[in-house]
Structure formats: C-alpha cells, structure tokens
Image (cartoon, rainbow, N blue to C red):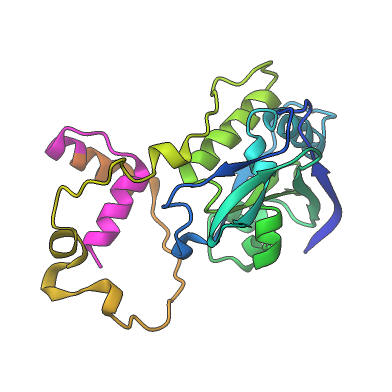
C-alpha cells in the first residue's frame, strides 16, 4: 500500500534569470503527436551504512540547486498567443517542480525491486497528471520510501519539455549534487528552435514522400487506419541488450546506445 503524505513545490535555490520570459520550442517539440507525458521510475536500494538523511530532504535540496541551471523544468507550457497550435515555455519568478512524498508498507525485496514493469504497484509510484496539469507542471516528481530504507524516484515529464536523454542528464546532475558535489558537470543550453528548426532558407535534399514516408509493402502510415493502440510491457534482460549492442558494434563499427539498438530491433521486428 502506498500512502502520500506531502506535496511541496521546489523552487530554484537562486533566481536563475532576471526577467520573466518565454522560451521557444522547435517544430519537432510542438508536434501534436508528442503532446504527452512520459512516466518512469528509478529504484534505489538502501545502503549498508546507516544515515539520518531522509531521501525526501536530500532530493529536495539537490533538485532546488539543479533547477538554477535546469530552470525550464520548472516552467509552464502554454499555447503561443499568435499561434494556438504551437507551445512555448513560460518562465516566471517563483515557479517550481512539485515533489510528492509517499511511503510504502513493504520492502523493495518483497516486490522484486519492481523488476516487473507491469506490476500494479508501479503505477502508484509515478505521478499521473491530467492534460492541463501536465502543461502547468510539465515536470512532477514523487519520492516513495520503503520500510527497508530504499526508495523510488518517480517522474512524469512532458515530452515537449525534454526527451529521455534530456531527462537522464537532469537526474544525473541531481545525483551529483546529492552525493555532495558543489557544481554540476553538465552545462545547460537552450537552443531548441535553432538546432531542431527548419533550415533558413528551406532546402529539400531528397524526395521526402517517396523515399521516407512510404514504407515497405507500399504502406503509407498517414493514410492508414491503425485502430486502437495497445499497451504492452516487455522485459528485456541486460545480457540480451549487451549481446545486441555487441553484435551491432561488430557489424557496423558504431557503439549505439541501448535506446538506439533496442528501438531499431523492435522496428525491424514489427
């Protein structure tokens, strides 16, 4: 059983900017198909060394310091006044990231360290904001402490705000600060509209429709009725991922990430 006892809004430890402002998003970020919140969790087992530091307080402090650079995660997604179909990030003083404190009445070992992603318990460990709350707070975190001393950090982040890699960099920076670092090794930069925007002037180098959108067997995805979307969970063992990456490295000479290797494998197996 999971009991939520506290919800705090964590603001940056220092004001990260002088004036309220908006940050533009790229065309890719404002794709309506990406207007969704991705949710995931990180499991931390308890250490052998006893400590009086509560995970909630440690994460609150590291989050507050990390937001001085990663302040867009505390911003609000809103529709642009001149173009309602496009989103932008509105950054204002006093904004923060909601952090929920929860407690579980069991040990991590008793639930197999949440190794089963289809476990009903996993849903209770991750925030699940509605569409409007997902825009007002595009990043929401939850710390759930288990009776063994281990804890789970659940995150709900709007995909227009960042992708999986961006979220990983943010949590790695928080982890550095939680371990006692005085500064983060990652320096943030916001150039989404420039790096992912259209070329100026526009230029087409290939026959987009014929070579990219038409898949094998004559399938044109934007005209197909795919029906309902099913949600499935697949447990992929670490040794299988290592074997797949090693095989790709031997064949291509490139060391692909787990996401790239597994994503390509699933796409080929569709």
- Relative to 197, is 93 on the left or the right? right
In which quadrant will I find the C terminus? bottom left
Q: What residue occupies the far right of the structure in this picture?
A: 5
Spot occupied by residue 100 in the image (x, y as percentages of width and height)? 78, 51
> Which of 145/169 is in front?
169
Spot occupied by residue 202 in the image (x, y as percentages of width and height)? 27, 46
Query: Can residue 4 be seen here?
Result: yes
Q: Main secondary structure of the magenta part?
A: helix
Q: Is residue 147 magenta?
A: no
- Relative to 207, is 6 on the left or the right? right
> Which of 135/78 is in front?
78
Spot occupied by residue 228 in the image (x, y as percentages of width and height)? 42, 82
> Which of 158/167 is in front?
158
In which quadrant will I find the N terminus? bottom right
Question: Relative to 79, is 191 above or below?
Answer: above
Q: Where is residue 92, by image quadrant?
A: top right
**Going 32% across and 51% down the picture, which residue do you hit?**
262
Q: Where is residue 263, by image quadrant?
A: bottom left
- Relative to 69, is 5 on the left or the right? right
Q: How many marks?
A: 0
Question: Relative to 15, is 121 above or below?
Answer: below
**Going 83% across and 58% down the picture, which residue do you hit?**
4
Question: Relative to 75, is 265 above or below?
Answer: below
Task: Please give the range of residues in magenta.
Answer: 249-270
Q: Where is residue 151, by image quadrant?
A: top right
**Going 60% across and 36% down the picture, which residue do you hit?**
171
Q: What residue occupies the far top of the structure in this picture?
A: 182
Query: Can residue 40 be seen here?
Result: no
Spot occupied by residue 142 in the image (x, y as percentages of width and height)? 72, 50
**Going 46% across and 72% down the picture, which residue do you hit?**
231
Q: Is residue 256 magenta?
A: yes
């Amino acid at each position: 059983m999971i009991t939520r006892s506290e919800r705090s809004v964590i603001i940056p430890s220092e004001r990260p900017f002088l004036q309220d402002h908006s940050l533009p998003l790229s065309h890719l970020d404002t794709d309506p198909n990406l207007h969704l919140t991705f949710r995931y969790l990180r499991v931390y087992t308890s250490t052998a060394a006893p400590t009086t530091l509560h995970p909630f307080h440690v994460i609150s402090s590291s989050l507050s310091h990390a937001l001085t650079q990663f302040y867009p995660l505390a911003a609000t997604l809103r529709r642009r006044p001149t173009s309602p179909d496009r989103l932008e990030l509105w950054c204002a003083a006093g904004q923060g990231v909601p952090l929920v404190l929860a407690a579980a009445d069991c040990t991590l070992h008793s639930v197999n360290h949440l190794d089963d992603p289809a476990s009903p318990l996993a849903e209770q460990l991750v925030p699940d904001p509605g569409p409007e709350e997902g825009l007002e707070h595009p990043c929401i975190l939850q710390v759930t402490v288990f009776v063994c001393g281990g804890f789970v950090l659940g995150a709900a982040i709007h995909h227009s705000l960042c992708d999986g890699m961006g979220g990983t960099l943010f949590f790695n920076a928080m982890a550095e600060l939680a371990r006692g670092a005085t500064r983060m090794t990652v320096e943030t930069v916001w150039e989404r509209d420039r790096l992912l925007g259209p070329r100026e002037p526009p230029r087409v180098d290939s026959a987009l429709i014929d070579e990219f959108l038409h898949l094998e067997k004559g399938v044109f995805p934007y005209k197909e009725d795919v029906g309902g979307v099913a949600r499935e969970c697949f447990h992929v063992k670490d040794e299988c991922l290592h074997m797949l990456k090693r095989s790709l490295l031997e064949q291509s000479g490139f060391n692909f990430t787990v996401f790239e290797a597994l994503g390509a494998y699933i796409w080929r197996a569709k």
